Image: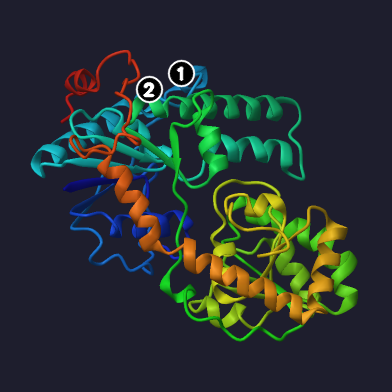
Amino acid sequence: MRFLVLTARRIESRQSGYDLRVAHLCAQLPGEVHLVVAPLQPAGDARPGLPVEGVFDSVEELGPLRGERTAPRRHLRTSNSHFLETTRPVAFARACARLAEIVRERAITHVVVFGGDAAELAATLDGPPVLLDVCDSKTLTASRARTGGRRRARGVHRVRTLLDVARKRRTESRYTRTFDVVTAISDADARAVEGSGPGLVHTLPNGLDEAYLQPLRTAGTRRGVVFWGNQAFGPNREALRFFVEEVFRPRLRDAGVELCVVGADAPDWLVELAAEEPLITLTGYVEDLPAIVSRYPIMVNPMCTGSGLKNKVLEAFGLGLVVVSTPLGVEAVPQARDGRHLACADHGESFADTVLALLDDAPRRDRLRRAAHDLVQRHYRWDAVGEVWRRLLDATTPGDGITALAPAPRSRPATRESTRATADRLGVG
């Protein structure tokens, strides 16, 4: 097999769940793997850190798809299915022409697309079967940001937000008619993408790096909790503000509970608070995450918005930390049970009470962390996820005998004119 892997960004950052997912799933592909990056914006300097040597047989980066002047008619669209073709026709046609060349030159047998940002390009390819890994549903993320955020949109901004959700929903609802196989990171994301066509999107969770699958560590002894993640990510910022304002400051601080926040791009309000509050520690980005977070017995996951699978939960399970989470924060880990593998709480007072009770109950913490550690060892190894992944890919190969996963025939979305005709008219390709 020869795979063309299409992404909308470089695969390079250990802090990005998307980058980690792409790298690990591509490492499971049985054959040549050729990565093509089609960036939406001009790419900045490379940020090495995620080792991908040996994963990709070649890497090619196309010109930015949003480098030309934006056409005003973008405001009239009802979905994002043809956003790039409509607003950046030259760059879009050039990228499509190059992708078609790569398919021919390298005799590609399968195309794998990661994320909806590159889906529009992949929809123009004829020949090899195309698997789209949606990762997180943009519809679900946007709708939860609208209804679950701490600051509700009003007036014109509210109308724009509603329109944005509607466009994303229409776009994602067409994926199962456009691509041979569609996957998502959780059942909730799959349902959001499916819309009115249930059962057409397959759930493919993340796995864990081997660093988090070692024998159970000694439990942390500090009287405190830890949170980690990229704080430039909106749902992480919402989670931290909820935890600090409704859990830590009114209830945990007076009980002498420490809060350690690990990750880059801490918001200004948190940096200012940490400068005045001795119980709050901000580490910034750290190379050795296990060494820092394992000092604490509890990881908090107070997610209020967002979608997808929170890698931090699986990492905490693997490292032997007890997880206290909102129900939303663990919806993508269906095997995890409240009271058996973790503790759930859905508002500030109950969250604080749960943390305090666990800090004072070492035997209960030990039961939870052992059960959670066993859970990830059995279900969330990348080689186990890879078996499902390869079976889905095999289902797109004629004569494989896997009829249960066989995709429906593709129905390419109608366009005003073919991409090839657009390329010819613009003198591209």
Residue 321 placement: quadrant: bottom right
- For label 1, count other residues whose C-alpha is less than 10 Å away and answer few (under 14), some (14-19) or many (20+): few
| 418 relative to 198 in the view: left or right | left
Q: Amino acid at mark 2?
A: Thr
Residue 166 at x, y = what percent?
58, 24
Residue at 86%, 73% in the rendered image: 253
For marks 2 and 1, the one nearer the N-term is 1
- In the image, 304: left or right of 82? right
Q: Quadrant of the C terminus?
A: top left
Whether tag 2 and tag 1 are in contact, CB under 8 A, the answer is: yes
Q: Which residue is mark 1?
A: 73
Q: Which one is nearer the viewer's eye here, 204 or 74?
A: 204
Residue at point 65%, 83% (across, down): 219
Camera-nearest residue between 9 and 376? 376
Rendered location of residue 202, percent (x, y) = 43, 40
In percent of width and height, residue 80 lies at 46, 27
Vertical placement of residue 319 versus 327, above or below: below
Dividing the picture into quadrants, the one containing residue 229 is: bottom right
> How far across and down, in percent of the image, does residue 354 sit?
81, 66
Q: Residue furthest top?
A: 416
Q: Is residue 236 at all visible to an observer of this figure? A: yes
Secondary structure beneath dot 1 equals: helix
Q: Residue at x 76, y 30 (%)?
A: 154
Residue at the image point whose x is 84% and y is 65% from the top: 352
Give the residue at mark 2.
86
Q: Is residue 238 above or below residue 218?
A: above
